[in-house]
Image (cartoon, rainbow, N blue to C red):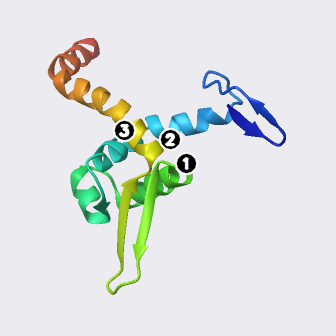
Amino acid sequence: MITTDSTLVAADVYSADCGSREIFGHVTSKWGVLVLAALAPGTQRWAELRRRIGGISEKMLAQTLRTLEEDGFVHREAHPVIPPRVDYSLTPLGAELAERLLPVVDWIEEHAVPLIQARDARKR
């Protein structure tokens, strides 16, 4: 259910005007999935995430973390120390979602060779 001004409505990701569609897009983006999967084992710092997620730019990592934080999946904790230290972790909602995404990530890794071969064959 989604709360709008004074009513509750059922979420429908298939509906173009449902607010859940935007969140669905954030979660299922390439970087969204990889950030959630990278945070699944536990709290990490910026540099750890950047190393773990090959090819992500600083701008894209910052944007993805901010978006997932706004959506309630990622918790950001800034420590008042010098040099500054920021830790990122999954919220309970984020951990629940990551549990569901990790099998998809694992499946793609397990089937990468035939998937890439099939894609390449269609390009010829």
Q: Quadrant of the N terminus?
A: top right
Q: Is residue 86 above or below residue 93?
A: below
- Quadrant assignment, res 62: bottom left
Q: Nearer the viewer, residue 117 or 10?
A: 10
| Residue 11: % across, % down | 66, 27
Dot 1: what SS?
loop
Tell us which disc is closer to us: 2 or 3. 3
Q: Earlier in the sequence, mark 3 or mark 1?
A: 1
Amino acid of disc 3: Ala
Q: Earlier in the sequence, mark 2 or mark 3?
A: 2
Badge 1: residue crowd in 10 Å (few <14, some 14–19, many ≥20):
some
Task: Kindly identify the amino acid type of the residue bearing the numbered disc 2.
Answer: His
Badge 3 marks a residue whose secondary structure is helix
Marks 1 and 2, the one that precedes in the sequence: 2
Q: Position of residue 43 (x, y in %)?
A: 30, 58
Q: CA distance from mark 3 to mark 1?
A: 14 Å
Kind of residue indicated by mark 1: Asp
Q: Which residue is mark 3?
A: 98
Q: Position of residue 84 (x, y in %)?
A: 36, 80
In the rendered view, tell whether residue 13 sits above or below residue 94: above
Q: Which residue is outermost to the front?
A: 92
Q: Residue at x 60, y 32 (%)?
A: 21
- Name the residue carrying label 1: 71
Q: Which residue is mark 2?
A: 26
Q: Is residue 66 above or below residue 4?
A: below
